[in-house]
Amino acid sequence: MARILQLDTAVAELVNDGDTVALEGFTHLIPMAAGHEIIRAGRRDLTLCRMTPDVVYDQLIGAGCARKLVFSWGGNPGVGSLHRFRDAIQHSWPVPLEIEEHSHAGMANRYVAGASGLPFAVLRGYAGTDLPEHTDTISTVRCPFTGEELAAVAALNPDVGIIHAQRADRAGNVQFWGITGVQKETVLASARSLVTVEEMVDELPEQPGAVVLPSWAVTAVAEVPGGAHPSYAQGYSERDNAYYQDWDAISRDRDRFREWLDSEIHEPERSAR
Amino acid sequence: MTGELSETPTTSEFTSDEMMTVAASRSLHDESVCFVGIGLPSTAANLARRTHAPELVLIYESGTLGTKPRRLPLSIGDGVLAETADSVVGVPEIFNYWLQPGRVDVGFLGGAQVDRYGNINTTVIGDDYEDPKVRLPGAGGAPEIATSCGEVLIVMRHSPRAFVPDVDFITSVGYGRDGAARARLGLPGRGPVKVITDLGVLRPDEGTNELTLTGLAPGVEVEQVRAATGWPLRVAEELGVQQPPTDRELRILRELKATVGNGESS
């Protein structure tokens, strides 16, 4: 059964230096507060996985938490580039960042294989591209029935999968809806999982189209209202588009980024949560 | 009632970006299924649904099938896409069940570089992948959109830096480094059939697949396009000129653009 924990306790217990960690969310329900808690906890040498690393990954990378990034599209959606990510790759600041690069279809299938307990997944992908030359977790496999050659991608099984959801009940059953991305697969593929939620309720209400993760498939749940900000939680909050735009200027400059870390992450009253 | 008048070319001023968006919109046929990315493709697809293609089916990679947004979405995960969709599915499903088997007719792609054979680069600028001059966002959904959609439309602003002889990195394959690789790979989709730019339209040559100038935007000269292209651009024998936007297209396009970022305007 999932344990109901405070966010800081959950991150301290579940995320270790050197772990492979996936904080997933496809522009909706991004576990931003959990990412900030990882920075605050001072974790190092993480291998971070995410289909769409965006602002929170830029922050984790700039803060020096990551040794490696496994991803398929890295950008500030609707705004432009991730400057901390670029600075890490182009100038090894603050530490060198190794990358392992896929397409969305490849990454999604890696999580599916991980969640299914299979060593790899098969897809029609990467044909004619230069990606397989640079990424060891892309290969090919021959269909035993038709002889067709197909792309194969290695399963992705993070040590810790972290997602944000709308609701959980007090037993730790999790419910989320709207654009659900690859979050279910992330939790099921990971050895340990943490779900932050907008709200804890006595009983999960009917919600058509919702994904439900039963308590026994989740390691820990933490109530963090607004924990997806500046992304959004459908039914609870709107996306804060200005934050994404402002991030462009903050992240361009190392000093401005350091000031942001000090005032927004390390200030004592913020870490009290 | 304004039908006849409104379908004639406008007499008002329009920008080259507006022409490019309208040209992209006109390339989408009614009742076809279109895989849409954010930015100009999304604007063009939503313009098409409001003009000549009301039954155009829009799919965004965030998992929204048949979405009918009331305003332009700001990102592929914009809530308005989920709220107005026929169905919302997970990301593995959108790629495995919907894109991979060939259910999508048209894919829209753009990038930092395109080469003479329609290969696209959104990964790195520079010869050394390990030590790039510029690190770009990466592949996203594009490699499989390029291979699995029935056909691909490329939309990009014309410049010698963007239209290069050979891309530094093939993120999404057009016709391959030699123009013939696509056929050798036996890919299900036809590949890029048109490149729409702010200066005109390029199409692959029927024999060599080399991108060739087949249409000019109004007021643009061939020499301008040549100067903005990084390889010796060939020009089709029958060179057309794009119809300027109609008053109706311009009005609807500008109304659409004005809705970006406004909460729930309907």
Image (spheres, helix red, strand yellow):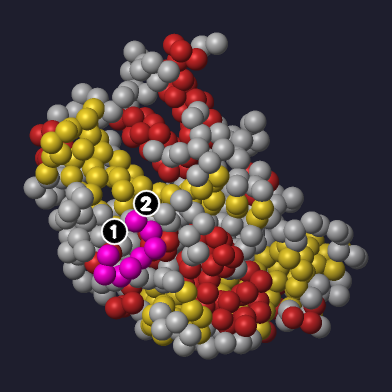
Magenta highlight on residue A76: no
Query: Which one is nearer the viewer's eye here, A203 or B7?
Result: B7
Secondary structure of the residue carrying numbered label 2: strand
Disc 2 marks a residue whose amino acid type is: Val
* Residue B189 shown in magenta: yes
Quarter of the picture containing the N terminus of chain A is bottom right
Residue furthest to the right: A202
Identify the residue position indicated by label 1 in the image.
B174
Main SS, magenta region, reads loop
**Residues packed near mark 1 inside 10 Å, few (<14), some (14 to 19) or many (20 plus):** many
The residue drawn where x is 55% and y is 11% is B1
Chain to which mark 2 belongs: B
Q: Which mark is residue A114?
A: none
Dots 1 and 2 on the same chain = yes
Which one is in front, A116 or A28? A116
Q: Are marks 1 and 2 in contact (CB under 8 Å)?
A: yes
Residue A257, image x, y percentages = 44, 60
Kindly tell me whether residue B102 is visible in this rendering: yes
Boundaries of the magenta span: B183-190
Q: Position of residue A211 (x, y in %)?
A: 73, 65
Residue receiving disc 2: B152
Snapshot quadrant of residue B194: top left
- Which image quadrant: the C terminus of chain A? bottom right
* In this view, A175 is above or below A10: above
Vertical order, B108 against A19 (above or below): above
Q: Amino acid at mark 1?
A: Gly
